[in-house]
Image (cartoon, helix red, strand yellow):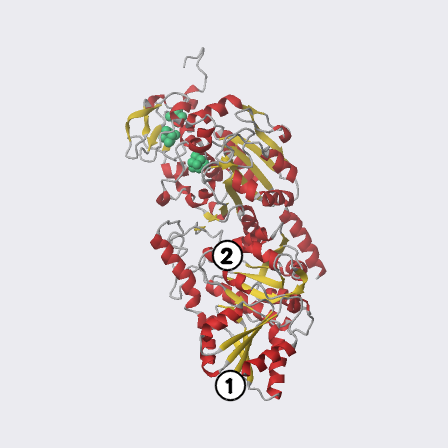
Amino acid sequence: MTDTLNAKNHSIEKYLRQDRMPHIWCSGCGIGPAVSCFLRAIDRAEIDPNKIALVSGIGCTGRVAGYVKLDSFHTTHGRAIPFATGLKLAKPELKAVVFSGDGDLVAIGGNHLIHAARRNIDMTVICVNNFNYGMTGGQVGPTSPLEARTTTTPYGNFEPPFNLPYLASASGASYVARWTVLHLRELERAITEAMIKPGFSFIDVIAPCPPIYGRMNKMPLPMDSMHYYQEKTIIRHGADPKEADITLNGPILAGTFVDIERPTFQDQLNHISSKVNAQV
Amino acid sequence: MNGDSACAEGAISAGCRFFAGYPITPASELAERMSERLPQVGGVCIQMEDELASMAAVLGASWAGLKAMTATSGPGFSLMMENLGLGVMLETPCVLVNIQRAGPSTGLPTMTGQGDMMQARWGSHGSYEIIALAPISPQDIFDLTILAFNLSEKYRVPVLIMADEVVGHMSEKVTMPTIAAKDLVERRRPKVKPGKYLPYKPDADLVPPMAVAGEGYHFHVTGLTHDERGYPVMTVEAHDRLVRRLVDKIRLNRHDIIKYKEFQVEDADIIVCAYGISVRIAQLAVRMAREEGIRAGLLQLITIWPFAEQRIRELSLQAKAFVVPEINYGQIVLEVERCAGDRARAILVPHMGGSVHSPQTILEAIREATQ
Amino acid sequence: MTLWRQPFDAAEKATKPGQIHIDKERCKGCDFCVDFCPTEALRMSVELSSKGYNFAVVDDESKCLACGFCELICPEFAITVSIPLDNNVA
Ligand code: SF4
Ligand code: SF4
Ligand code: SF4
């Protein structure tokens, strides 16, 4: 038989908690591919996996922390970012990665998101954005497009959603990108770049939630969402994130929108500390 | 030095190197002191966007291996209850200082109160045990802050310092000895290699050794009910095992944790049971009562939670009554009543907040108790 | 694929067929791998797995380019693509 590359060296299996598989996610859920991209990005970015601290909040995406073989923290609803802030500031050699969903990061945790971006805390936030609260049965979320049907907007959503790339960049993030879980090579590269980038990086990952959001919005099959991404994604690197609004089943602007240099919180802190200690 | 600053100094002496907080009267001076002092000792002080974030950041810092603290007052204390529960569940050493003011709600922001004592015990949802200490002076808050860090590292539980506005703002002489390393407790680290480590496998005292992030242990921790591996397990049995241990690690070690002081209780048949700033007023009242020939004594609760049940039971055999002055409308008195049973009466001396009792009101209650 | 001329480094650059391993018990039949495989090397099974899903199977491994996309897109981490180390590609 021909020799094969050892699957363990070659794939992401080594970063998965095998004793916790299979996971709880539904068939065709977009969280899995996003996790694969992240796990591959670890090697691609040449980050020591011992130094990664992965923090999740609550919700379907919040379960990511439980499946990766890294130091991983499944925290409270919305508080993954401040928890990760504490980890990172207390031990700067750590690579802080927050993996959570749109409801967790942007509704209940929205305040923390904008402030971490403003401070330019060195962390990577991967937001799996599926336009609703999947785990609790499909309620309207902060990114649900206008007119979307959810269990709490039976007549269609009338609240304007957040445009996440715009929100993150306006708050001061150093790196902002958006991809769908069909654009996996791009997503893997974006997560790699984001993890290498000093400062606050944010990736909006558009992902299907077929049995809940999809079913209520005429995309009941996993493939429906993927075909939608295939047809409606417009890739424009450097585009103004202001234009990244998403309408119901409308075009999805994707690409790297922000990639700038800005002093991180740690840089400023080191600067102050060395000044203080020079005086003492 | 004022109490807030003494608390900050106590924390630094105890080895605290991380502070996250949010401005609130009357605890702001503590954050201000930390922002000045921590950079001098290589620590990190960050003002977060709210108290939810402050408490979360403190937990994160503790899991990265630093001794961490936050400080707040009533309204912020309410917000911190969320992640206090996570701290209990993940068994995260940390210290939370509450410089109490008078509530409910915004209440009297600049004026004293002791109305958060039951919130300290039960404020976060679910069944758990917590440790809470009540300082009576700037010197005391310095000493108790060191004790708080030691207890939190030893038992892997958040420890609350339940001070109040008067203690926080009063200025008194504080002696700050250098604390020897042998007097500081550090959390137990795992003795096994990564791969063999079970994050929630307890030692004999029911406390599990704690790994920190970045050392290759690849541990998982979750606020969900979990087993010894730290993995979520959604069963009645796993929940029973976990909650029992979280509670029992404090209950079964209560003799090591509980501290109190007594003044003239040997022959007392009226015992004033006080905590925090009220202790100092009660001392005066007891002296006045003694001058009147009443056999009064004072029990000062240093540890509020876990409650000094056994001592109060014992004292209820000799005393006719307990007099309990509180700057609230009756919280700790309920505990005293429970422990005293029908052996001794428990008489509340309430004060709704904004100032301290006058010794006279406590004295009157002592007199009444002799009837 | 027919080319109008043979690239000079064709032998070096020739894609080697991958070997696809699909864990049928992990597969939940979403169809992603089958639909997005650029060479249609995979198909869905007719029979059901023990969990009641139609699962992905290799239809024609010789078509596989080892691009790895199926491994990346599988929400269940059910697919592993490995590349034979043997350089003598048939
Ligand atoms: S409910 Fe939606 S988001 Fe949650 S696991 Fe299922 S598909 Fe994924
Ligand atoms: S590796 Fe690429 S070519 Fe081979 S089966 Fe998978 S998707 Fe198809
Ligand atoms: S992508 Fe994975 S889960 Fe979906 S059909 Fe293929 S093997 Fe099955």
- The residue marked by circle 1 belongs to what chain? B
**Residue topped by disc 1:** B266
Q: Which mark is residue A207?
A: none
Q: Residues within 10 Å of mark 2 (few under 14, many from 20)?
A: some
In this rendering, would A275 be left or right of B51?
Answer: right
* Camera sees residue A46: no
Question: Helix, strand or loop at disc 2?
Answer: loop
* Extreme-top residue of the structure: C4
Q: Residue at x 53, y 45 (%)?
A: A78
Instruction: Specify the quarter for ligand 3.
Output: top left
Q: Position of residue A57 (x, y in %)?
A: 50, 45
- Against B281, is A67 above or below? above
Amino acid type of the residue tagged 1 in the rendering: Glu
Amino acid type of the residue tagged 2 in the rendering: Ser
* Camera sees residue A87: yes
Q: Residue at x 46, y 75 (%)?
A: B340
Q: Which of the pair B341/A208 is nearer the observer?
A: B341
- Against B16, is B261 above or below? below
Q: Earlier in the sequence, mark 1 or mark 2?
A: 2
In this rendering, would B288 be left or right of A96?
Answer: right
- Against B227, is B15 above or below? below
Q: Which of the pair A151/A121 is nearer the observer?
A: A151
Disc 1 to disc 2: CB gap under 8 Å: no
